[in-house]
């Protein structure tokens, strides 16, 4: 059996976007963090980090914002694979499974209900246009290094909301 693990399992010249978003309570101040690794070969990558917050949001919107910020950092005209690592079933399902049917069904799910957060999904799909994207679900949030950054941003969003 031939199995490849770690960085060697990534295709050469790919982008890996890792995202995390959260809220201090789910409708309230939230934060997100994303890393974008543009691999030029299996051993070398350019890394950028984006983070931010909102005073009144949801965890899903923060996850989606993290993804959008990551996609904006993929070089223009980049034709190699873009791998998204998320702990959100919504992100993974939206990119890998449901997105095409949402577009085909006029932004409605298979049950006929309107897609939530359509505004962000439209921006995400616009930023993803022309890119080869595959999303993968990662371990629960407590294991990711992005969690403390996003939590700090959520706390900053709380302070911003209290100051307003």
Image (cartoon, rainbow, N blue to C red):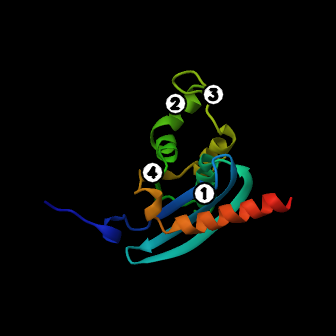
> Looking at the image, which residue is at 59% across and 55% down?
22
Q: Quadrant of residue 35?
A: bottom right
Q: Which part of the image, by quadrant, shows the N terminus?
A: bottom left
* Residue 134 in picture, x, y percent from top left: 44, 51
> Looking at the image, which residue is at 56% across and 68% down?
148
Q: Nearer the viewer, residue 153 or 72?
A: 153
- Mark nearer the N terminus (2 vs 3): 2
**Real-space CA distance between mark 2 and mark 3, rounded to the nearest whole angstrom:** 12 Å
Q: Is residue 132 left or right of residue 162?
A: left
Whether the residues at callouts 4 and 3 have beta carbons within 8 Å, the answer is no
**Real-space CA distance between mark 2 and mark 4, rounded to the nearest whole angstrom:** 17 Å
Q: Residue 135's mark? A: 4
* Residue 10 in picture, x, y percent from top left: 36, 65
Q: Which residue is mark 2?
A: 101
Q: Nearer the viewer, residue 143 or 47?
A: 143
- Mark nearer the N terminus (2 vs 1): 1
- Mark nearer the N terminus (2 vs 4): 2
Q: Which residue is mark 1?
A: 66
Q: Which residue is mark 3?
A: 114
Residue at the top extreme, as displayed: 112
């Amino acid at each position: 059996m031939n199995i490849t693990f770690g960085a060697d399992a990534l295709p050469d010249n790919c982008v890996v976007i890792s995202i995390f978003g959260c809220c201090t309570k789910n409708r309230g101040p939230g934060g997100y963090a994303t890393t974008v690794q543009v691999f030029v070969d299996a051993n070398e990558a350019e890394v950028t980090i984006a983070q931010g917050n909102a005073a009144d949001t949801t965890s899903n919107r923060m996850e989606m914002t993290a993804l959008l910020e990551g996609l904006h950092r993929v070089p223009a005209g980049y034709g190699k694979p873009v791998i998204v690592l998320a702990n959100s079933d919504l992100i993974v399902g939206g990119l890998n499974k449901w997105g095409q049917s949402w577009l085909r069904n006029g932004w409605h799910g298979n049950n006929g209900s309107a897609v939530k957060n359509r505004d962000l999904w439209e921006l995400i799909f616009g930023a993803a246009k022309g890119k080869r994207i595959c999303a993968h679900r990662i371990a629960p949030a407590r294991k990711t290094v992005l969690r403390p950054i996003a939590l700090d941003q959520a706390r900053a969003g709380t302070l911003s909301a209290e100051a307003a």
